[in-house]
Amino acid sequence: MTKLINTILKSTLFGIFFVSLVACQPQEQSTQKSIDQDGSEAILATESQKEVNLYSARKEALIKPLLKQFSEDTGIKVNVISSKADALLKRIQSEGNNSPADVLLTTDAGRLYRAKSAGILTAIDSEVINTNVPSQYLDEDNMWVGLSIRVRPIMVTDKGASLGIDSYEDLAKPELGKSICIRSSGNIYNQSLVAGMLNTVDETAVESWAQGVVANMARSPQGGDRDQVRAAAAGQCSVIVANTYYLASMLADQSNETDYQAASKLKVIWPNQTDRGAHVNISGAGILKTAPNKENGLKLIEFLSSKKAQELYANVNFEYPVMENIELNPILSAWGEFKADQTNLSVLGENNARAVMVMDRAGWK
Ligand code: FE
């Protein structure tokens, strides 16, 4: 029988929360203790048959049910360090060869690309993963694996629906007027959207497009994706660009009446359905080159790509599974099927710097 105990120790050094999901089974283990500035002790497995250390940029609540299931199925305990992706990357680099990190989990392909470029990942060779995950969601050199799909379509109020928008390109049409609310160019989701466009559209055209978008902004970019939903519902704008899981989570939580009502006013437009498809990003994972528990790390990623985990992902995070033929949450299925951009997501990382410069030159704050 497996009993799970959660321990949360706060670390002031990296603003990191340490979570340990302990499968109470007899186990052999050697551990490394790291003392954080507030005196709390994080115990991470160095080499063990039954443990894996996960450095995660995902919100803890969103991965906990998956990790619990993994531990129950395999008897492998998962030690989680949660923080922002860039802080985790820095931490792994400063820990060097002594890093206890086995698996890095991030919420976008751009950060996985950074990890790959930094040379801290090792190639993943797995039939299971290659069967479960379509190739456009896998790194070309097998350095990372996409685990869930995050779509960034256009959303409109009734007023916005009359503007005849059916592509990202349409967002730059002068007849839109000051109708768009969108977050800043410093945000990785917008950077990836533009990086994706740069793959099929010439850079000069992307820059004039960005200028057109800036001219159509109802207000200076501010806030997160949920704030764009709220602003549109409040009548500040009628067209927004946002990731669908934000809209879905607002629609799913009826206890927050204001957000629920705001989200209910928006309709999803799947852009570019007759050409490249809607822009998608992924959450995904890679195994560290210095991982002390590589085998368990691989088992964890294989599990996350499995049917069981993919079903959980779809329901807990409101993201789309990478595995085909998984039943969707009803909120997502109500938006209908869509064609996703098939570009290999490595491109988002490769084009990131150019995307940032294009947006900057276009005056996208
Ligand atoms: Fe997000």
Image: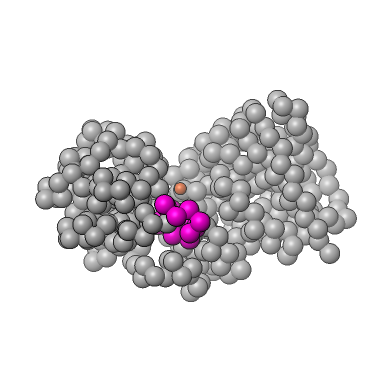
Quarter assignment of residue 210: top left
Quadrant of the snapshot with the N terminus: bottom right
x and y, in percent, of residue 352 in the image: 36, 41
Secondary structure of the magenta portion, mostly?
A: helix
Let me know if residue 251 is in the magenta part. Answer: yes
Quarter assignment of residue 98: top right
Let me know if residue 32 is in the magenta part. Answer: no
The residue that appears at 38% across and 39% down in the rendered structure is 223
Q: Is residue 205 above or below residue 94?
A: below
Q: Is residue 209 left or right of residue 27?
A: left
The residue that appears at 36% across and 67% down in the rendered structure is 335
Quadrant of the snapshot with the C terminus: top left
Residue farthest top in this picture: 37
Judge whether residue 196 can be spotted in this image: no
What stretch of residues is rendered in magenta?
A: 244-259
Q: Is residue 58 above or below residue 278?
A: above
Q: How many marks?
A: 0
x and y, in percent, of residue 15 in the image: 61, 32
Q: Nearer the viewer, residue 250 or 42?
A: 250
Residue farthest left in this picture: 175
x and y, in percent, of residue 47 in the image: 78, 45
Q: Nearer the viewer, residue 301 or 39?
A: 39
The residue that appears at 50% across and 73% down in the rendered structure is 327
Q: Nearer the viewer, residue 291 or 77?
A: 77
Q: Is residue 341 left or right of residue 283?
A: left
Colour logic = one colour
Q: Is residue 357 left or right of residue 90?
A: left
Quarter assignment of residue 153: bottom left
Q: Is residue 57 above or below residue 332?
A: above
x and y, in percent, of residue 147 in the image: 52, 58
